[in-house]
Each structure stands twice: as structure tokens, then as C-alpha cells.
């Protein structure tokens, strides 16, 4: 999943580094490309209004230069009411719709009208005496929009037309588009021609493209080398690095299981000049989740809205579904499956456009549905857990709601399975960190056993293992194979499971926790494994059908028999005097508080609530608990099956604030796009 560089390392046809009446549009911190000194893009040479005949169009063009795009569009639209063939007015409308309002289909419409109107008057091969600068600019604009709309054949056609008429040619720009069409040999040739050019911009674009081409070709080591060269080129030749330089290299490092190096690169990316695409905070938060560093992940995700606010309007929501996916995983693992499912459902219904990103769009859909499946199944347990202190009819209603959620979870798995049927996606998905699995959390891959069956899963593991030359990948394939074998009752697979645990990096804590859940299920050293699971992934316990056994400290809840009874009813929780984990709990009519500790004495989680908090929740209508005891049982149960980070509604609202904003800059005069 490599991102194309915009405004720094950029596929130039689709970039913003081109002049509008002499005003160069760039991303913050990017090298200002003079667009290779083409007179087509340096209107200072022929006059600011060259080729613009109508005073109203001149005024609209002037407003666009002054970064007043809405006024420019409105003036241009007024021109078009009286002169529907005014190509400059069509171009202005297309530009504003593209870069300021992100309405790509309409931008394409007006761009095509601009082209046809120009060519109707000056032909499709303009003479040097004609205002050919507009023709060149229109072709570039159309290519930009076509690329973002994922019409890659059309983009190549616009580049070809441009190259036939104008110099110098757009060479390396073709590499990314050819890669998106999976014409990898041609893409390499285009990138090679760009590297051979004396033009530093062509070299920059080519380096970026090669990084992605080798990644998508499955050449992980070559991709790492190409991404590193691209990063070094930016440092040494350009004097700066952008976010995309660093995030692409971090992804290549992740594909080789160099997780610490990936983390260092992502931390540097958070301080680099923002790029149009890619969000280092999202990738950093996802890496922290993989390592079960929940608080760090939460803090990283909290930075995402502010980072997105620094982008130009037309790319501000380019990765909205990715944001929802990342937040959904955090909320699922953080004990808020109902909110996680809501966000993941939005990500499934409203996928991102992928023109700027190298990976197969189906991978996003598969991962979202797998996470949504887990969220629904987790929610199915949670609704019964939250009803334990309620009257029988509410518990009965929760039982049927749980069944419905379970069915929906099964159906989400089926949806993921439909995407897996096409091509060789199951094998690719099992190659952790590679192009076919770039965004897939390793801990969720075992869920595919239930989706496709253990036999199909094991065959795919065998194929992926043979095709994968990365030595560090062996432990991952052992983990997947052991889980599938244990799922079909092969007790001897415990040996392979232990081999996987010995080979996996210690930082791969969520996947390791999942394997420890299997050790508990088959009765192997449950004490140590249970402590690890409780520490690293308590929210996975219900999903992995692992029972939480705790021993109440002597005298605990003697004065609160109803709360003790309700806790005994919590699905997945057993109160046992012989359990290694100890539950200290103090209850009164006014408050309940306590902590869960491991056999080692380590505090795993703590909780506290009060009657006042319950009364306030009732007044606000945020709880349906019929009594304080029922409320307290819910608070305790939720705390036991979550990692203890604050994911209150207020925090969640901040995380999903897709409208986080900063003061508009000179190239961002539009009002902030509304959040969802």
C-alpha cells in the first residue's frame, strides 16, 4: 500500500505544482516546482490574461489567482450562462470543483467541455499563434481528475495527447498509472526513463513509482531498497522529506518485519511536511495496536483530525474509510464493539477512492468486513453481559438481540469471503506486511478459518509459505497453520503453536495473545497464558471463547449479594476460589470500586462508579440499567473485558471528528468540510 506523492514526490500530472496565472500551488513545505519552465504554465511570459477574451472571464481568472475560488467559480458560471462554449470559464469551474470542492465528476464534465470548446475553435493541434497554453493546461487538469477518479486508461490517453503536442514529455508520470493497471513491466520502463532524465522532478516521481511498483509486484526486499533510495533522494537532492517519503519507507520496512525501524520512520513522518495523501498518525496508531500499546494508539489516533485539517480541501477526506477502519479496530479492542461496528459499517458502505494508493481496493473491503465481523460477534456477547442485572424479560430480549448480532457477524464474514473468491487474495492476505496484506492486522487473520474453513485455509497457508522468501515470515505461517489444525481438533498442533510463539517478535503482542488463547482452550499452561491474554487483549477473550476466572478476595461483596449474583451471571466470567487472578471489590450503597490483579501481583485493570454517576446517566438517557446494582455489574464486567483506556463517548466523538480544523491558509479559502 504505497501512496503516490503529491506536492513533493508527485505524479506530476495529478499534482498541484503548476501555475495558475503565475501563482504556484504547492503543499506546505513542498519544493516549489516551476513546472519545468514550460511557457504553457508561465503566463507571466505572455501576459496574465493571454487567451482570455471576455472581461468577465478575466475577472474570474483574477479571483482564482487571488485564492477566492468560490467567487471565481460563480463568475465563471455566470459567463457560461451566456457563452456555454467559453473554454476558460469551463476550466476555472473544473479547477475549483477539483481542488476546492472535491466534486470530481463535475470537474471532469467541465474539463471535457473546456477541451471540446477549445478544440472546436483552435483544433486539436493548436498552432503556436493560438493560446495553446490553455490547451496544455486543460489536458493536464483532465489527466489529474481522471487519475483521482481511477480512470487510469483515460489518464494515460491524456498524457499521450499532451506528450504528442508539448515538450518536455511527461514520462515518469506514466509509471504510477501503469502500475495501477497492473502493467508492471511497462511501469518499470517508464520509471527507468524518468530516472535517466536530467530533470530532478522526473527523477523524484520515478523513485516514488519504483517504490510502489516493486511492492505491488511482491518484491518486498527490492521495494524496501527502492523506497530507501527515494527517501535518500529527497534528503540529499531536494533538501527535505515529505510524509509520503517516510510512510512509504515505513511500510516497506514493515513488510520485512522491521517494526522498530517502521516506528522510527513514522514518528519522523509526524513532524515532516504534510503530504496530500497518507496519514502517519493512522499508521503509527495501527502499529501501536499491533503491539498492544493501547494508550499510545489512542494518543496517535487523537492527532489524526488535526493532521487532516492541514491538507487542501480536495484531499481532506481522501482516506475517510481508512480512518474509520483504524478507529474501528481501536474501539473493538478497547471494549466498545457497538461503536466499532458503526464506524466499520460506514467504512464498508463508503470506501475510499484508491487512485492515489497502490493497493488492491478489495483488501480494504476484506479487512473492514473481518473487523466488522469481530465487532458484531463481540457485541453479541456484550449485550448479554450488560443485561445481567436486569429483569428476566430484558435478559430474554438481550438473548435474541445477541442471536441477531451473531447472524450479522456471520454475514459480514460471508461478505469478506466473497471478495476472497476473486484472484489469489486469500494467499496474498496471509503474507503479512506484503502488498496483499499491507493493512491487515495479523491478529485478525485467524478469523478466516471460520470464514473459508480450515482445509482451504491450510492450503492457502502452504502456498503462501512456499512463495514467501522472507525468513521472518515462517513463525507467522506456523501460527496460522497451528490455529487451523487446532480448530479441527489436532492436539499435536500445540507443538507448532509453541514454535510460532518462540519465533514471533515479542512486539507482535496481539497475535501472540491470540495464540495464548488457544493454549488456554486446549489446557496447556493456562495460568501464564491467561495472564498474558488479560494484559494484552482482554477484549479478545469472548471472541476466542476463553473464560475469565477470578477469585474474589475474602469478604468481598458480602454486603452486596445482588451484585455478587449479577457478576456470577456475566457471560464468560466465572467466580472461582481457585483462580489465579484476584478481584478486589468494595461495594456500598453509594459506590463500587476495585481492581483485578494477576497472580504476579500486577494490576491488570481497575474500575470505579457511583450512584451519582448512575443517576446522571439515567437523567441523560444514556443507560437503560434498571438499578444501581445492574449498573455496577455492567461497569465491572466492561472493565474486566477491556484494556482500561478511556473510550468514553466524549473521547470517541473527538476521535471521529472528521472536521478537525485549523485556520485556513492562503490556498484553502473554503469553509471547512463538515464532519460526519
Image: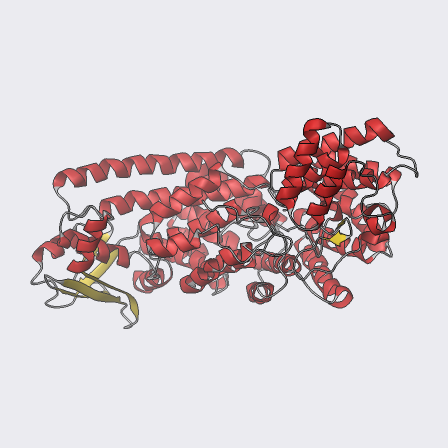
Q: Which residue reaches farthest front?
A: 55
If the image is split into quadrants, where does the C terminus sit? top left
On the image, the x and y values in percent for residue 451 come to 44, 38
Give whichever of 52, 282 is nearer the camera: 52
Give whichever of 196, 102 is nearer the camera: 102
- Label tally: 0
Image quadrant of residue 629? bottom left
Q: Which residue reaches farthest bottom?
A: 601
On the image, the x and y values in percent for residue 81 come to 68, 28
On the image, the x and y values in percent for residue 298 come to 43, 60
Q: Is residue 547 left or right of residue 519?
A: left
Give whichever of 365, 493 is nearer the camera: 365
Confirm whether residue 583 shows in the render: no
Image quadrant of residue 398? top left
Q: Residue at x 37, y 53 (%)?
A: 518
Confirm whether residue 204 shows in the render: yes
Q: Residue at x 22, y 58 (%)?
A: 636
Q: Is residue 206 left or right of residue 275?
A: right
Amino acid at each position: 500500500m504505497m501512496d503516490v506523492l503529491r506536492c513533493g514526490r508527485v505524479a506530476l500530472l495529478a499534482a498541484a505544482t503548476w501555475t495558475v496565472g503565475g501563482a504556484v500551488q504547492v503543499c506546505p513545505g513542498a519544493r516549489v516546482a516551476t513546472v519545468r519552465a514550460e511557457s504553457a504554465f508561465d503566463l507571466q511570459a505572455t501576459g496574465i490574461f493571454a487567451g482570455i477574451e471576455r472581461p468577465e472571464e478575466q475577472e474570474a481568472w483574477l479571483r482564482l489567482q487571488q485564492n477566492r475560488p468560490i467567487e471565481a467559480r460563480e463568475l465563471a458560471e455566470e459567463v457560461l450562462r451566456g457563452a456555454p462554449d467559453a473554454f476558460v470559464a469551463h476550466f476555472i469551474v473544473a479547477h475549483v470543483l477539483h481542488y476546492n470542492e472535491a466534486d470530481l465528476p463535475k470537474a471532469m464534465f467541465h474539463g471535457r467541455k473546456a477541451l471540446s470548446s477549445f478544440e472546436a475553435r483552435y483544433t486539436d493541434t493548436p498552432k503556436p499563434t493560438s493560446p495553446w497554453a490553455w490547451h496544455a493546461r486543460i489536458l493536464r487538469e483532465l489527466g489529474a481528475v481522471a487519475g483521482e477518479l481511477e480512470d487510469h486508461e483515460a489518464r494515460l490517453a491524456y498524457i499521450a495527447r499532451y506528450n504528442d503536442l508539448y515538450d518536455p514529455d511527461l514520462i515518469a508520470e506514466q509509471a504510477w498509472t501503469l502500475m495501477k493497471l497492473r502493467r508492471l513491466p511497462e511501469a518499470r520502463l517508464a520509471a527507468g526513463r524518468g530516472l535517466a532524465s536530467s530533470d530532478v522532478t522526473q527523477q523524484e516521481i520515478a523513485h516514488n513509482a519504483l517504490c510502489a511498483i516493486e511492492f505491488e509486484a511482491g518484491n518486498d526486499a527490492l521495494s524496501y531498497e527502492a523506497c530507501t533510495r527515494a527517501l535518500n533522494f529527497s534528503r540529499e537532492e531536494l533538501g527535505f522529506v515529505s510524509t509520503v517519503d517516510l510512510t512509504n519507507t515505513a511500510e516497506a520496512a514493515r513488510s520485512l518485519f522491521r517494526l522498530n525501524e517502521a516506528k522510527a520512520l513514522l514518528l519522523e513522518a509526524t513532524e515532516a511536511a504534510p503530504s496530500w495523501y497518507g496519514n502517519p498518525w493512522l499508521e503509527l496508531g495501527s502499529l501501536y495496536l499491533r503491539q498492544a500499546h493501547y494508550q499510545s494508539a489512542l494518543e496517535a489516533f487523537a492527532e489524526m483530525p488535526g493532521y487532516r485539517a492541514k491538507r487542501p480541501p480536495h484531499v481532506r477526506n481522501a482516506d475517510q474509510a481508512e480512518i474509520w477502519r483504524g478507529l474501528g479496530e481501536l474501539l473493538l479492542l478497547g471494549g466498545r464493539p457497538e461503536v466499532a461496528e458503526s464506524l466499520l459499517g460506514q467504512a464498508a458502505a463508503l470506501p475510499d477512492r484508491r487512485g492515489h494508493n497502490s493497493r488492491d481496493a478489495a483488501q480494504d473491503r476484506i479487512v473492514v468486513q473481518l473487523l466488522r465481523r469481530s465487532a458484531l460477534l463481540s457485541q453479541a456477547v456484550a449485550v448479554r453481559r450488560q443485561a445481567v442485572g436486569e429483569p428476566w424479560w430484558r435478559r430474554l430480549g438481550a438473548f435474541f438481540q445477541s442471536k441477531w448480532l451473531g447472524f450479522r457477524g456471520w454475514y459480514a464474514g460471508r461478505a469478506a469471503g466473497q471478495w476472497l473468491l476473486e484472484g489469489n487474495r486469500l494467499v496474498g492476505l496471509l503474507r503479512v506486511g506484503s502488498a496483499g496484506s499491507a493493512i491487515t492486522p495479523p491478529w485478525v487473520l485467524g478469523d478466516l478459518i471460520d470464514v473459508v474453513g480450515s482445509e482451504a485455509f491450510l492450503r492457502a497457508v502452504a502456498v503462501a509459505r512456499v512463495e514467501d522468501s522472507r525468513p521472518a515470515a515462517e513463525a507467522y505461517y506456523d501460527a496460522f497453520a497451528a490455529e487451523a489444525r487446532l480448530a479441527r481438533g489436532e492436539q499435536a498442533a500445540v507443538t507448532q503453536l509453541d514454535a510460532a510463539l518462540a519465533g514471533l517478535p515479542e512486539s507482535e503482542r496481539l497475535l501472540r495473545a491470540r495464540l495464548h488463547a488457544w493454549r488456554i482452550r486446549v489446557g496447556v499452561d493456562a495460568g501464564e497464558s491467561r495472564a498474558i491474554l488479560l494484559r494484552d487483549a482482554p477484549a479478545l477473550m469472548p471472541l476466542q471463547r476463553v473464560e475469565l476466572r477470578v477469585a474474589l478476595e475474602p469478604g468481598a461483596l458480602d454486603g452486596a449479594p445482588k451484585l455478587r449474583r449479577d457478576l456470577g451471571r456475566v457471560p464468560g466470567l466465572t467466580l472461582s476460589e481457585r483462580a489465579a487472578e484476584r478481584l478486589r471489590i468494595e461495594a456500598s450503597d453509594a459506590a463500587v470500586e476495585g481492581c483485578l490483579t494477576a497472580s504476579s501481583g500486577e494490576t491488570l485493570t481497575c474500575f470505579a462508579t457511583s450512584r451519582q454517576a448512575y443517576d446522571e446517566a439515567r437523567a441523560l438517557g444514556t443507560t437503560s440499567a434498571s438499578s444501581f446494582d445492574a449498573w455496577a455489574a455492567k461497569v465491572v464486567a466492561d472493565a474486566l473485558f477491556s484494556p482500561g483506556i478511556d473510550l468514553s463517548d466524549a473521547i470517541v466523538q473527538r476521535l471521529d471528528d472528521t472536521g478537525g480544523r485549523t485556520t485556513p491558509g492562503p490556498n484553502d479559502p473554503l469553509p471547512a468540510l463538515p464532519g460526519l
